[in-house]
Amino acid sequence: MALWGGRFSQGPAQSVAALSRSVDFDWRLAQYDIRVNVAHVHGLTASKVIAAPDAEKIIAALKELSSEIEKGSFTYNDSDEDVHSAIERGLIAKLGALGGAFRAGRSRNDLVVTDFKLYIIDHIMEIAQTLSLLVDALNRVAADYKGALAPGFTHLQHAQPINFGHEIAKHSHSFLRDIDRITDWLDRNSISPLGAGALAGSALQPHPEKSAEELGFTGLHLNSIDAVSDRDFVAEALFIFSLIGIHLSRIGEEFTIWSTTEFGWAKLDDAFSTGSSIMPQKKNPDIAELARGKSGRLIGNLTGLLTVLKGLPFAYNRDLQEDKEPVFDSVETLQVILPAVIGMIETTTFDRARMAGGAVAGHALATEIADFLARSGVPFSQAHETSGKCVRLADSLGIDVHELTDAQLSEIHPSLTPAIRATLSGEGATSSRASLNGTSTSSIAAQVESLVAQNSKALKKIEDARSSFSRMMSI
Ligand code: ARG
């Protein structure tokens, strides 16, 4: 059903209707549309544009429509342009002419952006909650492997030994920042565009701040032109989704490398890996690869929206209809990838012996020699130089630097006494880094404790926001 037509001698050409039609994707907004319409009808009742008994009938019909949509007995048809027109068709079928009364004083321009904001609020909270499960899973693995020695890399070259729990816990921090960005997004974007009308505000809806409150917003867009034009909240959400994708891609990359025969660190669970149609022996890290690959489309969705917005004139332009599909796609992409990644993290086992075996290879303890000398009062430039000489000697002998004998070490520098052995081992090196941010077993234990506390605090905030949102949605 079209919501316009009086001034036209004929309906749109078929090609125009096909181009214009958004209902196939914006039907996802149906329940939010109903909720926003209920708030709007309350506003129209307060301003006496709709008489109270009529408002009751309209609201009852909207409720009925909501449960029919839920059950699937009401849906869009070929004649509907978008979700808003489909719902109005449903109302008119129930109420006759009265079904068209509720849209006085608002435009699809303020309606669509309000619906869409509610959709994102709802889904971004769900994503935050799933991220919190991901952080939980990471925290558990980090705690399990807090004392498991492993090589630490820079430039993908052996650098210094670490405990593997530290390597895993770093991801918890990224995802906690994502959750934090989501709560920050929720705080900033909790302003309602409803009541902006087409662009100039609504003469029939004098108190849009009341609708804002009813819809759970903490404030109102104070400029009606900004209200219908603003898609910053969409761009910000797509950025958050992209960054989550990037974080997932970096985990994906690690699990892919760690599960190679060359590394042999990670053993993926059968339920969280896939086979090859030709090579019977294969067990592939497809989840990790999809986590890495899907970041591409998440970034593409952000880039697409930013391109639509660039240079766009203010107030509503039909270009803005292009804001929704990227968000639906990003949300639905995260909805499939996050549970699989959580499962992969929970079920992968790591080979402690294999990781420990490589922890000090590649002269990874050279920094310990320099640090030992610095602690003995040797200026660091000289300490660095001396450690370099030890590496050169070890290289010429075909051994690692920590395998030099006490005699060979003290010959290179008299301060290199046997006391150096306390830190010239994987265990010694990691436990000497016992600062709050360090890789010692005790530091990791404290770090995980703090991560767990941060995560439960963040989760509580999201859960509270989710339950007030669902109270608001239930009409
Ligand atoms: N389907 C449109 C959208 O998603 C709804 C708003 C249409 N407004 C208009 N003035 N044509 O943006």
Image (cartoon, rainbow, N blue to C red):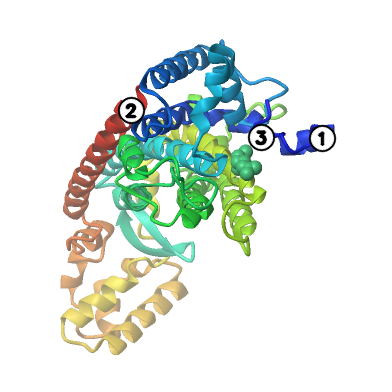
Residues under numbered marks 2 and 3 in contact, where contact means CB atoms less than 8 Å apart: no
Question: Toward the viewer: 65 or 126?
Answer: 65
The percent coordinates of residue 60 (x first, y second) are 41, 15
Does the beta carbon at disc 2 come under 8 Å from ligand 1? no
Label 1 belongs to which residue? 9
The disc label shown at residue 22, or none: 3
Give me the disc on residue 193: none
Image quarter for residue 74? top right
Mark 3 beta carbon near ligand 1 (under 8 Å) = yes
Counting residues from the start of the chain, the first of labels 1 and 3 encountered is: 1
Going by the numbered disc 1, the residue's amino acid type is Ser
Mark 1 or 2: the one toward you: 1
Q: Is residue 401 above or below residue 315?
A: below
User: Residue 283: where, in percent of width, then height?
Assistant: 57, 32
Q: Position of residue 134 (x, y in %)?
A: 36, 38
In the rendered structure, find residue 470 and report the number of the disc placed on it.
2
**Observer-nearest of 62 and 52:** 52
Quadrant the C terminus occupies: top left
Where residue 35 sits: x, y (%)? 42, 28
Question: For numbered disc 2, what is the local secondary structure?
Answer: helix
**Mark sitting earlier along the chain (1/2):** 1
